[in-house]
């Protein structure tokens, strides 16, 4: 099975939110007929307006498409889509391929791959390394069967610069979760430094402008975005929420614990993420940690 070129062949997509919506747009631009299922009426409406066919169930997507992408928020959502009532397992047939781009734990992917293999179908965990606005330049570390990854490469290149085979089922997830632990720590230290700038009498915007335009090795795309939001106090239109960061970092920390190690820095930063969530900031952008540091420092003064 191969979907080379831009013939009007059906591709399935379950989950058309922030990242799934990006995937959808790029597949349609590349000439594919995309069949979408999403539990959200808003997501279905947006997908329909982009030109997608809307399915009533995940199973219907599996019935109509040979390759099905999933882009879902949590492991439980992925498990339910595969195994739940009207889920993929009801309609999957031999040779079909399910590609999960969600950020989930290794065990979820391993279990799903084993379940789907009962239908002689194939499973790939290929989470996204990249932000929504960098669609087309994403990289997908992929776990599963190398032959299956090779089959979906052309299709994935509609929305990613490449898909890289990294090992057996679950290994794509391992790469992504380690990346998310780095994200968590860089986000936190960026928020703290921006708050410290104020504390020592440096204007935040001036600090941001000087550092972000420098050639310093500390400057990253994430620093630019996080610090830029802090300068503007722009927390209500999140690129990535505290809720999702807590979920991803929590999965990464648990993965480390399952390997009999304890990540020191990431675990400490996770307490900050969880404190922000407990304070009702879960729906805010991750840069909202700056307000947490402001509160901490004001109590010390």
Image (cartoon, rainbow, N blue to C red):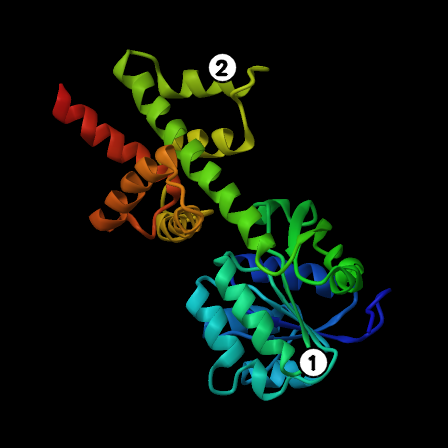
- Residue 275, how many percent across, how many down? 24, 44
The quadrant the N terminus occupies is bottom right
| Image: 292 above or below 60 | above
| Image: 11 above or below 261 | below
- Residue 283, how many percent across, how many down? 34, 52
Marks 1 and 2 in Cβ contact (< 8 Å): no
Mark 1 element type:
loop
In the displayed structure image, the side of residue 296 where residue 249 appears, left or right? right
* Mark 1 to mark 2 CA distance (whole Å): 56 Å
Crowd class of label 2 (few under 14; some 14 to 19; many from 20; radius 10 Å): few
Q: Residue drawn at (61%, 85%), measured in percent from left and top?
A: 60
Q: Which numbered disc, 1 or 2, marks the residue that appears first in the sequence?
A: 1
Image quadrant in which you'd find residue 30: bottom right
| Image: 253 above or below 297 | below
- Residue 185, how many percent across, how many down? 41, 34
- Which residue bears the numbered disc 2? 210
In the displayed structure image, the side of residue 208 where residue 159 appears, left or right? right
Q: Residue drawn at (41%, 21%), measured in percent from left and top?
A: 205
Crowd class of label 1 (few under 14; some 14 to 19; many from 20; radius 10 Å): some
In the displayed structure image, the side of residue 160 where residue 107 appears, left or right? left
Q: Is residue 32 visible?
A: yes
């Amino acid at each position: 099975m191969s979907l080379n070129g831009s013939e009007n062949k059906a591709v399935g997509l379950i989950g058309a939110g922030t990242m799934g919506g990006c995937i959808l747009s790029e597949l349609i631009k590349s000439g594919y007929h995309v069949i979408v299922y999403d539990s959200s009426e808003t997501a279905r409406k947006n997908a329909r307006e982009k030109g997608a066919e809307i399915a009533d169930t995940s199973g219907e997507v599996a019935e109509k498409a040979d390759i099905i992408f999933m882009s879902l928020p949590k492991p439980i959502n992925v498990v339910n889509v595969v195994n739940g009532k009207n889920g993929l397992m009801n309609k999957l047939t031999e040779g079909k391929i399910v590609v999960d781009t969600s950020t989930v734990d290794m065990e979820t992917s391993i279990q799903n791959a084993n379940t789907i293999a009962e239908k002689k179908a194939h499973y790939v965990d290929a989470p996204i390394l990249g932000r929504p606005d960098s669609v087309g330049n994403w990289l997908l570390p992929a776990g599963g069967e190398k032959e299956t990854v090779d089959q979906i490469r052309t299709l994935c290149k509609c929305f990613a610069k490449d898909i890289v085979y990294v090992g057996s089922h679950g290994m794509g997830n391992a790469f992504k979760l380690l990346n998310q632990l780095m994200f968590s720590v860089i986000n936190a230290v960026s928020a703290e430094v921006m708050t410290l700038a104020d504390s020592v009498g440096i204007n935040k915007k001036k600090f941001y402008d000087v550092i972000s335009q420098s050639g310093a090795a500390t400057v990253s795309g994430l620093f630019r975005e996080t610090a830029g939001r802090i300068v503007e106090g722009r927390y209500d239109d999140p690129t990535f929420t505290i809720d999702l960061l807590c979920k991803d970092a929590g999965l990464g920390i648990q993965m480390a614990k399952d390997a009999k190690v304890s990540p020191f820095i990431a675990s400490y930063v996770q307490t900050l993420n969880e404190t922000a969530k407990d304070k009702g900031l879960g729906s805010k952008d991750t840069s909202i940690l700056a307000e947490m540091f402001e509160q901490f420092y004001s109590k010390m003064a």
